[in-house]
Image (cartoon, helix red, strand yellow):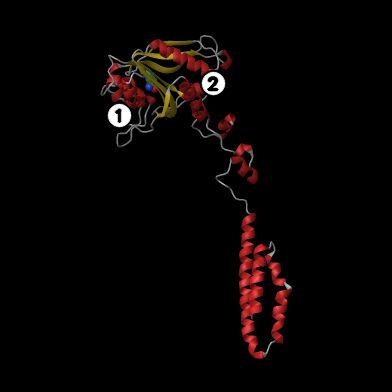
């Protein structure tokens, strides 16, 4: 009997190490154990038979469990923490099936990169806001017709998915007030998604992106703003550009301007082909006041424009609706 127990332990240890555990059932030691029963006195055969059966069950269990382990180890698993190529190599995926960054993500990063190198601090804008940030703090009087120009969506609770990144101005001004008072300046750029309830066509989308600059100091000038914007566009398009400004009305700037660039010949334009890129101007005194900044001591400028328009010109994209379409054919051009 002791011999049976000893052999059981030995065989189970072999199963754990074997790649073909079922073969162990054919071992000569087992055959000897089975054969030994006939050489025993009749009264001992019952107990002996039981211990042999017990051995067989234990061995069978060990073999089945080892076989399952071997099977599992053979299945390809995805290690979600591994670098991408490690998994694609194992799963034989083609590069075309890899995810890519959306072109807008790449371009927003390019835009923000240029402004941060100029000394602007970047803030992502909100996707839900209120009437005060959308209009009130931006010098839109109650019931003023200029409010209608923004085709705002509203939630049933009265919140507004922002129709421009200017909704960030009041927050940026309030957060930067201490810097001004310590003798510094506010230089911020915000970017993010905006929403307008518009009829859609090749140049109008209900969901798009804007980038917006806010600069305040004791002596900010329109000339600084125009210089900063011209540099920005020339860096973004990588070439010298002709630019111009023309008067425009926005309640939150005075004077208000539109900034236009001449569509470069290299990008399919011809001389005299002007493209309005953004709205801008000197921040209205009431906007500074609503953030608690004294407009007698401080002055500033701001601009805001659409990301898609910039990118469409850069890449020759003819329809703004491609961006939100989710069409792989479009997105793959930016692999
Ligand atoms: N928020 C304006 C728009 O979306 C653009 C703008 C921003 C104009 C800042 C002036 C100053 O139409």
Q: Residue at x 52, y 32 (%)?
A: 102
- Is residue 322 visible in the rendered image? The answer is no
Give how far across and how far down residue 315 sits, in percent. Answer: 55, 23
- Answer with the quadrant where ligand 1 appears in the image: top left
Relative to 15, residue 49 above or below: below
Q: CA distance from mark 2 to mark 1?
A: 34 Å
Residue beneath label 2, please? 314
Q: Residue at x 45, y 15 (%)?
A: 229
Residue beneath label 1, please? 131
Give how far across and how far down residue 246 sits, in percent. Answer: 41, 10
Q: Quadrant of residue 35?
A: bottom right
Q: Residue at x 37, y 29 (%)?
A: 162
Looking at this view, is 334 or 85 the one in front? Answer: 85
Give how far across and how far down residue 7 sits, in percent. Answer: 67, 74
User: In screen coordinates, is 331 left or right of 1?
Assistant: left
- Is residue 6 visible in the rendered image? The answer is yes
Quadrant containing the C terminus in the rendered view = top right
Label 1 sits on a secondary structure element that is helix
Circle count: 2
- In this view, which residue lies farthest toward the left? 142
User: In screen coordinates, is 92 left or right of 318?
Assistant: right
């Amino acid at each position: 009997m002791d011999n049976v127990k000893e052999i059981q332990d030995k065989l189970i240890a072999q199963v754990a190490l074997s790649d073909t555990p079922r073969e162990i059932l054919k071992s000569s030691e087992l055959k000897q154990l089975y054969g030994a029963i006939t050489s025993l006195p009749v009264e001992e055969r019952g107990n002996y038979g039981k211990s042999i059966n017990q051995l067989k069950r234990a061995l069978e269990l060990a073999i089945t469990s080892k076989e399952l382990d071997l099977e599992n180890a053979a299945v390809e698993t995805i290690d979600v923490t591994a670098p991408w190529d490690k998994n694609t190599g194992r799963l034989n995926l083609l590069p075309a099936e890899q995810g890519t960054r959306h072109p807008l993500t790449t371009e927003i990063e390019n835009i923000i990169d240029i402004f941060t190198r100029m000394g602007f601090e970047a803030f992502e804008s909100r996707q839900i806001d209120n009437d005060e940030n959308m209009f009130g703090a931006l010098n839109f009087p109650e019931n003023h017709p200029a409010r209608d120009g923004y085709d705002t969506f509203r939630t049933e609770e009265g919140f507004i998915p922002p129709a421009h990144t200017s909704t960030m101005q009041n927050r940026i001004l309030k957060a930067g007030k201490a810097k001004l008072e310590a003798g510094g300046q506010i230089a911020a750029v915000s970017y993010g998604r905006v929403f307008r309830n518009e009829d859609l066509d090749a140049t109008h989308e209900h969901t798009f992106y804007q980038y917006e600059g806010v600069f305040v100091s004791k002596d900010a000038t329109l000339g600084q703003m125009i210089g900063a914007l011209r540099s920005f566009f020339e860096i973004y398009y990588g070439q010298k550009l002709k630019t111009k400004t023309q008067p425009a009305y926005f309640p939150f700037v005075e004077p208000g301007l539109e900034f236009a660039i001449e569509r470069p010949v290299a990008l399919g334009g011809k001389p005299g082909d002007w493209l309005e890129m953004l709205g801008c101007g000197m921040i209205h005194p009431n906007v500074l006041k609503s953030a608690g900044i004294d407009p007698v001591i401080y002055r500033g400028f701001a601009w805001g424009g659409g990301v898609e328009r910039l990118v469409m010109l850069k890449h020759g994209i003819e329809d703004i609706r491609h961006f939100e379409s989710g069409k792989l054919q479009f997105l793959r051009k930016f692999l």
